[in-house]
Image (cartoon, grey):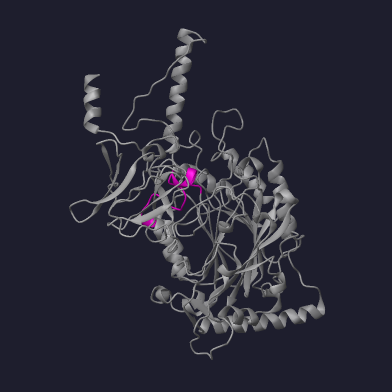
Amino acid sequence: MSLAADAFTLPAAPVVGMAARGATAASALQAELPPSLQGPTASTASSSIRAAALGGGIAVVGAAGARRQQAARRQRRRQQKLQRQAPMLRASEPSLEDAPPPALELSADDPSAFVIGVLGDLHLDPRDLDHSFEGRDHMKAVLKDAPRKFVVSLGDLGESKDVNETKQLFSGTTDCFKLAREYLDGFDAKWDVVGGNHDLEGIDEFKTDEENLEAYLNILGKETPQFCHEVAEKVLLVGLGSTAFRTAQYTSHEVSIDQKQLEWFEDVIRKHPDSEGWQVFVFSHAPILGSALRVLQENHVVNGCCWLNHCDNVSSKKFIEVVRSNACIKAWFSGHFHLSHDYEDSITFPGGNNRGSCVFVQTNVMTARSSRDGRRQSRVLRGNSEGFEVCTIDHKKGGKLRLDATVTYSDECIIDPDMVDSMEDGAASCSTVAFAHKHEDYDHDLWFSAYVPQEDDGCYIMNPDGTINPDEDGDFSNPDKVCWWHMKDGAVLGVHNGMIIEYDAGSLAPLGMVVSRDELKDRKVAVIDDEWGGSALVLYEENSDNVTVVQPNEDGSYWRKVVRNKMHRMREMRRVAAAKNWMKQMKGEDSEIKILSSYGPYTTTAGQVMGLSTRAIDPKAAAREKVAA
């Protein structure tokens, strides 16, 4: 998402069932909003810029739009009466100098008004709680006197280290859950939590995920990993929690939503349609495939743990399908990446990108030891029947509250005509108008630059046939080289940051690494006919007769699922340490002991893809070498 103002101009749209208007659809919608919800005027353009709602198409007025219009009129009359009687109640706290303060008028007498505090990865460490307590105090100040306040924790409750000299991870243990319960009770508000990828790590205390999950639920006072709370009139909070760690097929850092939860989620959304005026806000530890939030290629992409159910080719796509077909889902909050709110794509808007009516929101961490970019932040969601605001609490600036985005519900709706058939009944009758508020913290060095393929980005290779980097400057191991293409089987591959990456064909979200840097260095890349109606990806060197065929996986994907389950790796490393200690007792403490491991089909105990190689091997030659040895 660019911050250029012209990138956020809502295209004019034909109006169905209404007289055509001279102004653009965006201007018309803006003019009809009450003053408290109107976006910035031309005089405040430096502080705020407009985001498209749902990229051009047709405007529709329907039953839901009429109901919202009536509700808005009732709300305005109620507010006018209250203004004559007493000052409006609103969530307090100062604003950041270069960004507008929250502007949505919230009244305790309005049954639809609410304020939600959203906490990113807590990673509580009993040795170091200063920033955690500071962050809680900041959040409590914002929530003080707020109408219908609620707190949501996005999981990863404890530090994934030995914090008490037990040689065990703290996260996922009984002590961790008790500390988290005490900490969350201290917010003086109702709260709930969704499990993250570290919350079932109590591998020494609990033998199975089921036993670990039971302790998690019991101590935190939950009945199920998921939750559903109606916090205000027609306002629903829905949470989805991870339930697998020991049983993860690949990386245990994948956030796994089981099939039972997924079916429950679909049922809840189906029973709370937008056509009846419902607003649904969803919370999960990791974001969903298709959200377009910023990710870390060097970490979450190559390790296959960016998205909910990342390694499951079917269920990982289900979440965005639900979002696309249900306009009641207004926003989806996630953590997991430990990244700040100071990137343009820390919030993504529905803007012709096939993301329904949903705003996706990244949530940062409170503590300096958990932050990847030095920022310490939490989120605040505040709204009523007319719309909502997404704000940042900046813990490094004394808990200052910053307005990041304003979303208003429109009586006219701009939708993608291609999506009409797939949307629920009435879903096309309302939409959102979003404003992304610029602030001083965007002026940084753009840490963790990310590339996601986009149509018409100038990097697409149409119908690749033969070598795709023939020029002398076409070294794809160069981090600055970017391109992408389709294989004949529909797979989307691309070059970024010196690697070949696979992208989801539907959303173009990154999935994982196909070819590592060392394998790609000084190689030519070609897409050739496989002589059976498909295509094959090959690597070769001009001064050599050797060629490498990059074989797809058995499930048809290309990205390499090579990161092993953390529990097995930890146990193997413990055995290695035990063997080393035993040998030192026999040979003496000064002995330099070299430890080797023999096990299964793997060749390393590494838990990160980076450092591993995808370099090709000749399996027959390897077998001959083993026999000769």
Examine the structure image and report whether residue 303 is included in the region drawn in magenta: yes
Query: What x and y, as percent, mark residue 628?
Result: 22, 20
| Residue at the spot 43% in from the left edge and 46% down from the top edge | 304
200 or 446, nearer to the observer: 446
Judge left or right: residue 314 versus residue 270.
left
Residue lying at the far top in this picture: please name it: 587
Q: Residue at x 47, y 13 (%)?
A: 592
Q: Quadrant of residue 407?
A: bottom right
Q: Residue at x 24, y 23 (%)?
A: 625
| Relative to 598, residue 335 above or below | below
Residue 313 on image: x %, y %: 36, 54
Give the position of the C terminus as an image quadrant.
top left
User: Residue 6 in the image: x percent, y percent?
Assistant: 58, 69
Q: Is residue 71 above or below residue 289?
A: below
For the N terminus, the quadrant is: bottom right
Q: Which residues are magenta?
A: 296-315
The residue closer to the viewer here, 513 or 365, is 513
- Write the residue at 41% across / 34% down: 568
- Left or right of residue 610: residue 466: left
Counting from the top left corner in percent of width and height, residue 499 is at 41, 44
Q: Is residue 108 visible?
A: no
Q: Foreground residue, 485 or 356?
A: 485
